[in-house]
Image (cartoon, grey):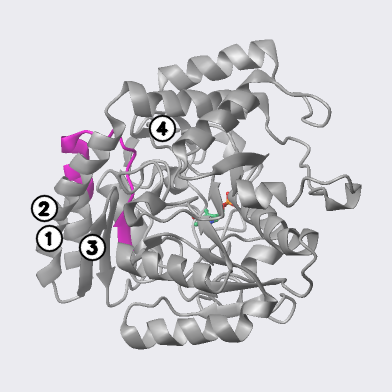
Amino acid sequence: MPVSPVNPLFPDMPDWQRKATDNLWPPYTQMRTTPIGLPVSEAEGVRIKLADGRTLIDGVSSWWSVCHGYRHPHIEQAVVNQLQKLPHIMLGGYQHEPAALLARRLADICPGELNHVFFTDSGSVAIEVAMKMAIQFWLNNGIKGRHKFMHFRGGYHGDTFATMAVCDPEEGMHSHFSGVLTPQILAELPINDELYERLDNQMATHADALAGLLIEPLVQGAGGMIFHSEDVLKKVADLCQKHDILLIADEIMTGLGRLGEMVACQRADVTPDIITFSKTLTGGTVPLAATIASRRIFEAFLDDDPAKALMHGPTFMGNPIGCAAALASLDLFEQEPRLDQVKAIETQLIKELESARELPAVKDVRVCGSIGVIETTGLGDVNLLKKRFVEEGVWIRPFGNIIYTIPPYIIGQKDLTQITSAMVKLSKEL
Ligand SMILES: *Cc1c(COP(=O)(O)O)cnc(C)c1O
């Protein structure tokens, strides 16, 4: 018997799955009570194909990454070409065209003097690098004691040890480790005058200890798809400037078109000191992340003293296949009307989710760019709800008390309607 319950949606497991039921450790899962994952064989466009040939419309873009749909031919070709030429080379002592051109292009996309790109393999590590840069920025400038980070309730910045410490402490995901983590400084988003004043005071109190402040601009994702206005983001940025605290914009979720712009901060006319991208960076094909620093940060590391160098270098840093995929993904924002598609998704989501607002179990309906959220009073049996979505032909992963969709930007109108109809229908069943 497998450790996990047989998935009622797929009782007849394929051989490969039966063979390895307790070898493969799933993410964020109580294995005893959650059915084993559905076996997938392939995916194309917005459709995920299960091992028995059934297809599901992808409503979450594989954790918000597959923005151009699966197997976009332009990215696929770029990956194959790179694989056959130079699949990998260490970035220590070498440079290669895809990494250099991608760094240049990311610098062009980012506002201000965010020109200096450090590549890693995952979002969490990109944030860790941003935190290391921020701490060392002060040290390299001869200022001691600034090694803390301010972060916001509802925030999420990753699952590694440094990043767990800057996630919402009550959200539950990392509560076991609270005694082990470096205490950081939790703040509330300044959504009203009172909280604005409080944040101003909190920054004044801690400025001498703070290296930087971390924020997910405009949308806090994994913490519950919580939105704040451009004005709030602008106020946070202005306060960082006032107290000389480095502003780190975590755009791993919000960047690269998600909200309708390549850089979400631009909506509030905010230029952070450091910005991070990952998830959609390669169009969701291979892992890659980038931490991009301003000239001011970068220059603090330029010195004759080797101790002032940034001592970080993941083995697969700037992997050529990843960089080639990311370049191809960025091409698609220019060659295809991607940002217009996000606008169209936004308009359709606003229209089609609205009817859920009146339902007894619904607290709020909100849309920002390609993110559509139905906030409920409670999801009940979440495994049952996930099963119901599959029965409706769509892949939706409710969590906390929200049902949300973040479809690939290329989704067609009819497919999106199938997603929104299922979201509204199942909200009725709550
Ligand atoms: C997903 C996410 C991360 C972590 O990225 P991983 O690649 O999963 O490590 C960090 N910050 C935000 C805002 C994210 O959405």
Task: Measuring from the top left, give residue 84's x and y in whole percent.
Answer: 65, 11
Q: What stretch of residues is rendered in magenta? A: 403-419
* Of the pair 112 and 9, the residue shown nearer to us: 112
Disc 2 crowd, CA 10 A, few/some/many (<14, 14-19, 20+):
few
Mark 4 in CB contact with mark 2 (< 8 angstroms):
no
Mark 1 in CB contact with mark 2 (< 8 angstroms):
yes
Q: Earlier in the sequence, mark 4 or mark 3?
A: 4
Residue type at numbered disc 4? Asp
Q: Quadrant of ligand 1?
A: bottom right
The residue at label 4 has a CB less than 8 Å from ligand 1? no
Residue type at numbered disc 2? Lys
Residue found at x 50% / y 50%: 252
Can see residue 53?
A: yes
Residue found at x 21% / y 38%: 415
Q: Marks 4/1: CA distance?
A: 35 Å
Mark 3 in CB contact with mark 1 (< 8 angstroms):
no
Residue type at numbered disc 3? Arg
Left or right side of 251 for 269:
left
The tag on residue 354 is 1
Residue type at numbered disc 1? Glu
Task: Measuring from the top left, give residue 392's x and y in whole percent.
Answer: 24, 48
Q: Earlier in the sequence, mark 4 or mark 2?
A: 4
Residue found at x 50% / y 14%: 77
Task: Measuring from the top left, give residue 198's x and y in whole percent.
Answer: 45, 87
Q: Marks 4/3: CA distance?
A: 36 Å
